[in-house]
Image (cartoon, rainbow, N blue to C red):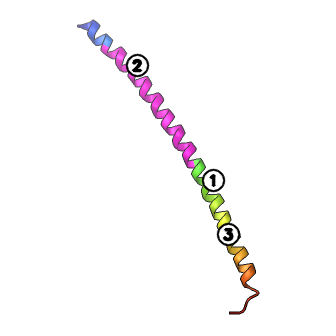
Amino acid sequence: MIQTELKTIKQFQKRKIQVEKELDDLKENLRNTERKHQETLRRLEGKFFEEKVQHFSVNKYFVY
């Protein structure tokens, strides 16, 4: 009986290590995704601002 419990504990410890590694990998992937998202957001905001300024620069010479 003690041998069975010891085996169960060892299996649990191995599985715990695997699950912790999977969690670390998921956290790393989430950080990378968040970083890429922020970079994309900044790029799109900059592009929008440039287009807005360009649109304003062109249209300020026209009287409606």
Instruction: Locate residue 58: give its quadrant.
Output: bottom right
Give how far across and how far down residue 50 sits, in percent: 71, 69
Q: Earlier in the sequence, mark 1 or mark 3?
A: 1
Q: Nearer the viewer, residue 53 or 19?
A: 53
The residue carrying mark 1 is: 39
Residue type at mark 3 is Phe
Q: Secondary structure at mark 3?
A: helix
Q: Which numbered circle lies on residue 28?
A: none
From the image, tell me which residue sits under label 3: 49
The image quadrant of residue 5 is top left
Do callouts 1 and 2 mark residues in contact (Cβ within 8 Å)? no
CB-based contact (under 8 Å), mark 3 and mark 2: no
Disc tally is 3
Q: Quadrant of residue 2?
A: top left
Quarter that holds the C terminus: bottom right
The vertical placement of 42 against 18, above or below, is below
> Where does the magenta region start and end?
8-34
Which residue does the image show at 61% across and 55% down from the upper left? 40
Residue named by callout 2 = 14
What residue do we see at 55% from left, 48% from top? 34
Q: Give me the C-alpha separation between circle 3 and circle 2.
A: 53 Å
Q: Nearer the viewer, mark 1 or mark 2?
A: 1
Mark 2 element type: helix
Query: Callout 2 environment at 10 Å: few (<14), some (14 to 19), or many (20+)?
Result: few
- Depth check, front residue: 21 or 41: 41
Q: Please name the residue shown 46% across and 31% down the image.
A: 22
